């Protein structure tokens, strides 16, 4: 099984750099030059099954990565939406195209019931806000307000699309923001 380390965003500059939405708490430790990341992208996108990190830098809080396989802005544009994976070293059969990985499209989530870990109803998914630093799950609360919950495993521990449920464990005060 593989875990998503980052999702590639828009190109930056003309030399193949891309912005990434980080899905790791140790980007400096993960984004090491020479690291080969398995990828997951839309079928037929032409994205290589693995990308070799050529450079990585934090630019005003946004990580910019470049890959050996992508020399220019045109190539970088084709990577948009690609997920960089961290393979599980104990699983020799890890397949980067496994559809059961933790990555969802808004249309898969909108309308799903949202509960707390104890099973009490919290609302329903109203959207997914893809931010430059982090995705946020948008939840329509019973009073009509919309809560934006950082889409990280600690706060959204369960996303079960086939089972039609999302579990959210918000810290005190988050829903009042």
Image: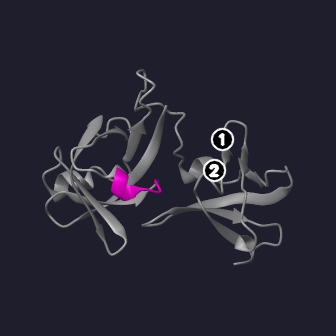
Residue 86 % position (x, y): 40, 40
Q: Residues within 10 Å of mark 2 (few under 14, many from 20)?
A: many
Q: Give the residues in magenta.
A: 24-29
Front-most of residues 147 and 35: 35
Secondary structure of residue under mark 1: loop
Crowding at dot 1, Cα within 10 Å, few <14 / some 14-19 / many 20+, comes out as few
State the residue in front, 3 or 147: 3
Measured as percent of width and height from the top left, residue 27 is found at 38, 57
Q: In the picture provided, is 109 more to the left or to the right than 48?
A: right
Look at the image and say whether residue 85 sits in the magenta stretch. no
Residue 46 seen in the figure: no
Q: Position of residue 121 (x, y in %)?
A: 84, 56
The residue indicated by pointer 1 is 161
Farthest bottom residue? 177
Residue at the spot x=49%, y=31% of the render?
A: 1
Count of marks placed on residues: 2
**Image point (28%, 37%), residue name:** 50
**Vertical order, 45 against 121 (above or below):** above
Callouts 1 and 2 close, C-beta under 8 Å: yes
| Helix, strand or loop status at disc 2 | helix
**The disc label shown at residue 109, or none:** 2
């Amino acid at each position: 099984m593989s875990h998503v380390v980052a999702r590639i965003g828009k190109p930056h500059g003309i030399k193949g750099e891309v912005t990434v939405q980080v899905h790791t708490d140790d980007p400096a430790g993960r984004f090491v030059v020479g690291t080969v990341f398995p990828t997951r992208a839309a079928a037929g996108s032409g994205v290589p099954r693995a990308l070799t990190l050529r450079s990585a830098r934090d630019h005003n809080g946004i990580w910019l990565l470049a890959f050996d396989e992508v020399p220019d802005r045109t190539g970088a544009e084709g990577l948009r939406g690609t997920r960089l994976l961290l393979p599980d070293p104990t699983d020799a059969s890890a397949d980067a195209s496994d559809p059961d990985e933790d990555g969802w499209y808004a249309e898969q989530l909108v309308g799903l019931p949202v509960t707390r870990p104890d099973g009490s109803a919290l609302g329903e998914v109203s959207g997914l806000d893809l931010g430059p630093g982090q995705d946020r799950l948008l939840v329509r609360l019973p009073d009509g307000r919309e809560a934006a919950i950082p889409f990280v495993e600690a706060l959204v521990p369960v996303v079960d699309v086939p089972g039609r449920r999302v579990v959210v464990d918000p810290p005190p005060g988050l829903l009042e923001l």
